[in-house]
Image (cartoon, helix red, strand yellow):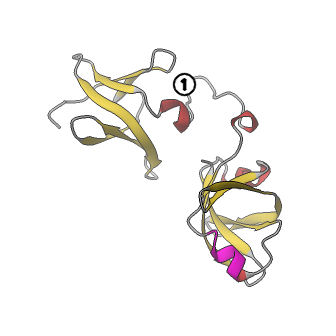
């Protein structure tokens, strides 16, 4: 997921977009966008877009009025993985981390990464085991090692917390 449609912009079918890309306007360069419409992935080409305030506004092919755009609010923007290229050294796509086992330095299994989300300050891992935990994904501080191939993330975390 590289972003989410968050609202409407004008009356001609433009949408407001929250972008997870850096810089935020890069979301416009990934084509096509795939949106889940009633359980079916549907592709949309971005025909225009620009930064607007703290977000992005975009016009999608085939979305020509406010009512059609309103049906897209809340939809996650997904693109083909091949468009993203490889992650840099010490960088990870959320999709690569989801499902990995989370183990403390003491060898206690906390669970698996169910999802990740951004808070503005840092990324947070939602770890589901015998209970749900929210752990900051701060490399060097909490996250000590990420072994994607081995399916495991090692953390410095008190299992009682």
User: Residue at 59% of width from left, 50% of height from top?
Assistant: 20
Q: Residues within 10 Å of mark 1 (few under 14, many from 20)?
A: few
- Please tell me whether residue 69 belongs to the stretch shown in magenta: yes
Magenta part of the chain = 67-72
x and y percentages locating residue 58 in the rendered image: 75, 66
Dividing the picture into quarters, in which one does residue 109 lie?
A: top left
x and y percentages locating residue 102 in the rendered image: 34, 26
What is the total number of numbered labels drawn onto the structure image? 1
Dividing the picture into quarters, in which one does residue 65 lie?
A: bottom right
Question: Quadrant of the image for the C terminus?
Answer: top left
User: Residue at 52% of width from left, 37% of height from top?
Assistant: 94
As displayed, is residue 42 above or below residue 142?
below
User: Residue at 21% of width from left, 17% of height from top?
Assistant: 106
Left or right of 48? Residue 157 is left
Which residue is identified by label 1?
90
Specify the farthest residue to the front.
39
Specify the farthest residue to the left.
160
Front residue of 87/4: it is 4
Left or right of 43? Residue 53 is left
x and y percentages locating residue 148 in the rendered image: 50, 21
Dividing the picture into quarters, in which one does residue 91 lie?
A: top right
Front residue of 109/118: it is 109
User: Residue at 44% of width from left, 43% of height from top?
Assistant: 116
As displayed, is residue 108 above or below residue 122?
above
Q: Main secondary structure of the magenta part?
A: helix
x and y percentages locating residue 19 in the rendered image: 62, 55
Left or right of 105? Residue 42 is right
- Please tell me whether residue 112 belongs to the stretch shown in magenta: no
Give the SS element for disc 1.
loop
Front residue of 28/129: it is 129
């Amino acid at each position: 997921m590289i972003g989410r449609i968050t609202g409407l912009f004008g009356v001609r079918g433009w949408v407001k977009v929250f972008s997870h890309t850096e810089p935020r306007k890069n979301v416009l360069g990934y084509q096509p966008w795939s949106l889940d419409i009633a359980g079916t992935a549907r592709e949309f080409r971005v025909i225009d877009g620009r930064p607007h305030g703290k977000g992005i506004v975009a016009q999608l092919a085939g979305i020509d009025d406010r009512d059609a755009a309103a049906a897209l609010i809340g939809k996650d923007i997904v693109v083909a993985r091949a468009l993203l290229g490889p992650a840099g050294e010490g960088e990870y796509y959320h999709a690569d981390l989801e499902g990995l086992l989370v183990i403390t330095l003491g060898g206690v299994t906390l669970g698996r990464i169910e999802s990740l989300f951004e808070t503005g300050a840092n990324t947070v891992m939602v770890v589901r085991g015998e209970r749900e935990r929210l752990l900051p994904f701060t490399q060097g501080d909490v996250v000590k090692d990420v072994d994607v191939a081995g399916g495991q993330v090692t953390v410095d975390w008190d299992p009682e917390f």
